[in-house]
Image: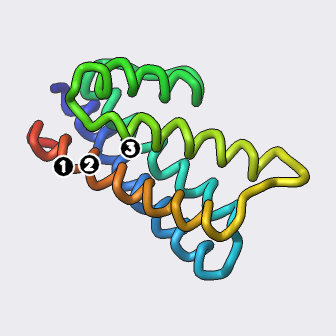
Amino acid sequence: MREEVRRLVEAYLEKAWRKLDVAKRLLKSEDWEDAVSRAYYAAFHAAQALLLTEGEEAKNHRGVVTLFSLLFVKTGRLPRHLGKFLANLRDERESGDYEVLSWVDRETAERAVKEAEEFLKEAEHYLRALGLP
């Protein structure tokens, strides 16, 4: 793997962990919608890191979810539930960010942060098996 790609993978993963930390702080301050948004971006950046290991880059959020599913879930490289986590987090983030009457509540936010953390741990484990960060 080229050094430039290796650095990008590492940067995406570091950014993912920072977003998760922010999501946890927002959860503590009872800012449900923004906690979900940051949780989604944590998983999104981790997914971007994974895609780079396959020489792929998505043009948009839907593309990240689709490529992740095709390259990692359908191939059995990563557990199926991670694809569901990523898709659900994207949907919940969109509701919280764009809907005036959002349905995002404490339970949704807590679940989102938990799912994002599991996604990051699985992504990091996969990347380490490849000899990356």
Residue at 26% x, 48% y: name it. Answer: 122
How packed mark 3 is, by other alpha carbons closer than 10 Å (few <14, some 14-19, many 20 or more), is many
Q: How many C-alpha atoms fall within 10 Å of the one at disc 1: few (<14), some, or many (≥20)?
A: some
**Mark 1: which amino acid?**
His
Q: Mark 2 vs mark 3: which is more N-terminal?
A: 3
Does dot 1 land on a helix, a strand or a loop? helix
- In the rendered image, residue 83, in percent from the top left (x then y), is placed at 41, 34
What is the three-letter code of the residue carrying label 3? Ala
* Most foreground residue, 106 or 65: 106
The answer to the question of whether label 2 and label 1 lie on touching residues, with beta carbons closer than 8 A, is: yes
Distance of label 1 from label 3 (alpha carbons): 11 Å
Specify the color scheme: rainbow
Q: Is residue 114 left or right of residue 71?
A: right
Q: Which residue is mark 3?
A: 46
Location of residue 130 in the rendering, given as x and y in whole percent from the top left corner: 11, 37
The residues tagged by marks 2 and 1 sit, at their Cα atoms, a distance apart of 5 Å
Furthest-right residue in this view: 100
> What residue sits right under mark 1 in the picture?
125
Question: Where is 78 relative to 123, above or below?
Answer: above
Q: Which residue is mark 2?
A: 122
